[in-house]
């Protein structure tokens, strides 16, 4: 059988990793796919042309116009590994229009333009593989779309941004500063072109949006995701969390409730006894709760050249195997048949339900704690644990930290507003959400 021919758009971290794997494991991959998979063309920036020439040594035709790769007759699958929305969107749609299959690692593109891309691909009968777009090398899309297909998925919780997890771990274990840890993550090829996507939870929200679509059979609704990053986390809160037996992680959480779908990314206290709380560095983990299987956990490198290339190649092999199958008999892009998608409501963050860590600075005098607990009790919020520090010498104020039981976010909003208006309080109340992640 003739080899299947791949055109790479972008030969950076992921493009380079993909090419390296395809070349190194060429025979093994052909034995699995049933045909050889070869890269025939790649588009790079003019400034990178010389370096790329040295890298591919005549084996791959190089150019600086990605549309040339998309339109080339010797390209069967277009692998979009450039990133960004445009021109990636236009190029992907051009490839689909020509009946070419697409593989992409671009979660920003799919989370924001995926509804259009998948519906166009469905109409044209072509496949769009995106395993690499979520959790790097972990085959989580395959697991959700196929392995767990018997289940009604109840919730997914994931550490799905390698860069922010790397930063949090370096700060906690090595005492690194935020800035220096970020620089290292960038040097290792983990960070997005714009690292605020990593730090502010946007990248994790892109990935969560994709997982929620596949898990619940809903369209991609990135604009309704609640997103809060790690840039305002303090070492003090990380320490207090540890005193209570928790780790703070940037967690993506999506849950099906009677009221609608929760879709949120934020720093979260997780009991340190949970496996997922011990996922460190660039590693990612995704915990999926299905009604039949219970909780399942997927763990692996969340970023980097070859871990991500591994996921790109897995899609290339899948497409190679399925290319001749009738499109109606392939696994649907988003797990559910396109006419079976539901438009369930994504809840505003004020309607989500979770537990909370609250830290406040209060006057060390009788009655203050009673005032605070009265406010919480009036709103039906019960306290699970509390810690009050001794005042430092010469200080009349102390840190008070409370962990609450589960409540609806709007009640915590009201409680914080009332607590902050007390004369006995100074500054604002720090609120970090807490998930016990019990697989009940
Ligand atoms: P890189 O910046 O390392 O590689 C992308 C390459 O594509 C760069 O060399 C870039 O050049 C080039 N490029 C961009 N636009 C064009 C264009 N119009 N014509 C020619 N070349 C172009 O990024 P990554 O490999 O890290 O990421 C690629 C994609 O994979 C992104 O969507 C990212 O989100 C995703 N991803 C990345 C992971 C990782 O670990 N790095 C993991 C999972 C997904 P220039 O730099 O000059 O723009
Ligand atoms: N910047 C992303 C991360 C790359 O750090 O997780 C993998 O998607």
Image (cartoon, rainbow, N blue to C red):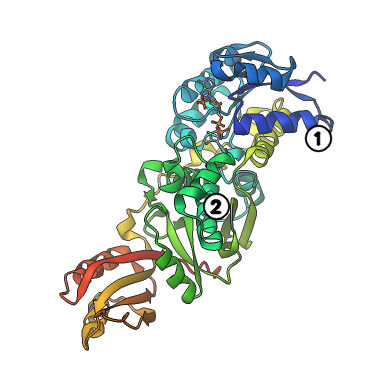
Horizontal and vertical percent position of residue 171: 50, 58
Q: Which residue is mark 1?
A: 32
Give me the residue at 26% from left, 79% from top: 395
Q: Which residue is mark 2?
A: 166
- In the picture as drawn, the residue positioned furthest to the bottom comes out as 366
Q: Is residue 264 above or below residue 31?
A: below
Q: Helix, strand, or loop for circle 2?
A: helix
How far separated are the C-alphas under marks 2 and 1? 34 Å
Marker count (numbered): 2
Which quarter is ligand 1 in?
Answer: top right
Give me the residue at 16% from left, 70% from top: 421
Horizontal and vertical percent position of residue 41: 66, 17
Q: Is mark 2 within 8 Å of ligand 2?
A: yes
Residue 248 in view (yes/no): yes
Q: Residue 97 got which mark?
A: none
Question: Neighbour class for label 1 at 10 Å: few (<14), some, many (≥20)?
Answer: few
Quadrant (top left/top right/bottom left/bottom right) for the C terminus: bottom right
Give me the residue at 29% from left, 72% from top: 360
Where residue 134 sits, quadrant-wise, is top right
Q: Is residue 401 left or right of residue 273?
A: left
Q: Is residue 292 left or right of residue 410?
A: right
Q: Helix, strand, or loop for circle 1?
A: helix
Q: Is residue 92 above or below residue 208?
A: above
2 or 1: tag closer to the N-terminus: 1
Marks 2 and 1: CB-CB under 8 Å? no
Horizontal and vertical percent position of residue 116: 45, 29
Residue 155 in view (yes/no): no
Horizontal and vertical percent position of residue 324: 72, 25
């Amino acid at each position: 059988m003739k080899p299947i021919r791949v055109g790479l758009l972008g030969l950076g971290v992921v493009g380079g990793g993909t090419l390296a794997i395809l070349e190194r494991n060429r025979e093994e991959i052909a034995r699995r796919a049933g045909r050889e998979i070869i890269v025939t063309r790649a588009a790079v920036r003019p400034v990178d042309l010389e370096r790329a020439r040295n890298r591919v040594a005549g084996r791959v035709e190089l150019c600086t116009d990605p549309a040339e790769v998309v339109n080339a007759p010797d390209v069967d699958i277009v692998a979009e590994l450039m990133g960004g929305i445009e021109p990636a969107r236009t190029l992907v749609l051009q490839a689909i229009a020509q009946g070419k299959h697409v593989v992409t690692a671009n979660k920003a593109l799919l989370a924001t333009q995926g509804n259009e891309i998948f519906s166009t691909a469905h109409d044209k009968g072509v496949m769009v593989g995106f395993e690499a777009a979520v959790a790097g090398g972990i085959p989580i899309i395959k697991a959700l779309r196929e392995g767990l297909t018997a289940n009604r998925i109840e919730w997914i919780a994931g550490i799905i941004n390698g860069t922010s997890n790397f930063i949090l771990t370096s700060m906690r274990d090595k005492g690194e500063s935020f800035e220096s840890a970020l620089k290292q993550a960038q040097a290792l090829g983990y960070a997005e072109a714009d690292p605020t996507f990593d730090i502010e939870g946007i990248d994790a929200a892109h990935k969560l949006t994709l997982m929620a679509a596949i898990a619940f059979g809903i369209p991609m609704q990135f604009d309704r995701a609640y997103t809060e990053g790690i840039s305002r986390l303090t070492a003090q809160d990380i320490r207090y969390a540890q005193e209570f037996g928790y780790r703070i992680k940037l967690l993506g959480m999506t849950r099906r409730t009677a009221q609608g779908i929760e879709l949120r990314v934020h720093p979260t206290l997780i009991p340190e006894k949970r496996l997922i709380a011990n996922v460190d560095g660039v590693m990612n983990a995704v915990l999926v709760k299905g009604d039949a299987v219970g909780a399942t956990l997927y763990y692996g490198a969340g970023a980097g050249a070859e871990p991500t290339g591994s996921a790109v190649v897995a899609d290339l092999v899948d497409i190679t195997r399925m290319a001749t199958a009738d499109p109606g008999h392939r696994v649907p892009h988003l797990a559910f048949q396109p006419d079976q998608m539901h438009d369930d409501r994504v809840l505003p963050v004020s309607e989500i339900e979770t537990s909370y860590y609250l830290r406040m600075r209060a006057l060390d005098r009788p009655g203050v704690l009673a005032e605070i607990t009265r406010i919480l009790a009036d709103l039906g919020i019960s306290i699970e644990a509390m810690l009050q520090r001794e005042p430092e010498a010469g200080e009349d104020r102390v840190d008070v930290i409370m962990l609450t039981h589960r409540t609806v976010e709007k009640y915590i909003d009201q409680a914080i507003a009332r607590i902050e208006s007390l004369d006995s309080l100074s500054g604002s109340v720090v609120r970090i959400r807490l998930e016990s992640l019990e697989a009940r």
